[in-house]
């Protein structure tokens, strides 16, 4: 017995994510990092009122306007730090001398990861697509009712 269930909300969420990712560059003025990208000391990602910054004091900080929402709390532990986004999905702050000072502990298998600073201020690491039908037409997918297929094999 095989079960195949795809909900319209899952397809809608995937379509929105693809639009966010494809409409932005991976430079410090965008809101996306791809594997092997990095933020140098003083660079940031931004979208709307939000900024995800690798500060010159080695602290990685998420701001809404001037308010700190989250920080790595690594200020002063090194100089000339860079934030690296590794091909295994892990974030790593490395000092100018090459010493690791912080890691996200999110590393896994090598894959197609992306870090996205979302319009709501949430910073998320997305992983590889595990399975897809390859039919990416958002109009057809969004309006299709949820499907459920049951196949009985004798």
Image: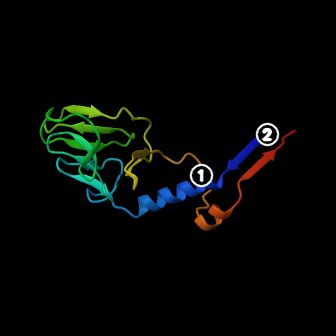
Q: Which residue corresponds to mark 2? A: 1
Judging depth in this view, the residue of 50 and 148 nearest the camera is 50
Residue furthest toward the right? 154
Identity of the residue drawn at 46% across and 62% down: 19
Please state the horizontal and vertical placement of residue 38, each as a whole percent of the image. Answer: 26, 48
Q: Is residue 50 left or right of residue 55?
A: right
Q: Is residue 80 left or right of residue 83?
A: left
Identity of the residue drawn at 26% across and 56% down: 28
The picture quadrant where one finds residue 49 is: bottom left
Judging depth in this view, the residue of 26 and 76 nearest the camera is 76
Q: Up-down: is 46 above or below 96? A: below
Q: Nearer the viewer, mark 1 or mark 2?
A: 1
User: Closer to the N terminus: mark 1 or mark 2?
Assistant: 2
**In the rendered view of the protein, which quadrant contains the C terminus?**
top right
Q: Which residue corresponds to mark 1? A: 10
Structural crowding at the residue carrying mark 2, measured as other residues with C-alpha within 10 Å and reported as few (<14), some (14–19) or many (≥20): few
Q: Secondary structure at mark 1?
A: helix
Q: Is residue 69 left or right of residue 7?
A: left
Please state the horizontal and vertical placement of residue 4, each as a whole percent of the image. Answer: 71, 47
Q: CA distance from mark 1 to mark 2?
A: 23 Å
Residue furthest toward the bottom? 139
The mark tally for this picture is: 2
């Amino acid at each position: 017995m095989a079960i195949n269930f795809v909900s319209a909300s899952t397809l809608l969420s995937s379509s929105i994510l693809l639009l966010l990712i494809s409409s932005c560059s991976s430079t410090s003025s965008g809101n996306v990092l791809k594997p092997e990208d990095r933020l140098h000391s003083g660079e940031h990602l931004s979208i709307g009122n939000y900024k995800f910054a690798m500060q010159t004091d080695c602290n990685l900080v998420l701001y809404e306007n001037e308010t700190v929402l989250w920080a790595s709390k690594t200020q002063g532990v090194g100089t000339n730090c860079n934030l690296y986004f590794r091909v295994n999905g892990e974030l790593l702050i490395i000092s100018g001398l090459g010493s690791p000072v912080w890691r996200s502990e999110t590393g896994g298998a090598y894959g197609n990861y992306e870090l996205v600073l979302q319009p709501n201020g949430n910073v998320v690491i997305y992983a590889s697509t595990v399975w897809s039908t390859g039919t990416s037409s958002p109009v057809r997918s969004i309006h299709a009712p949820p499907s459920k297929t049951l196949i009985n094999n004798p």
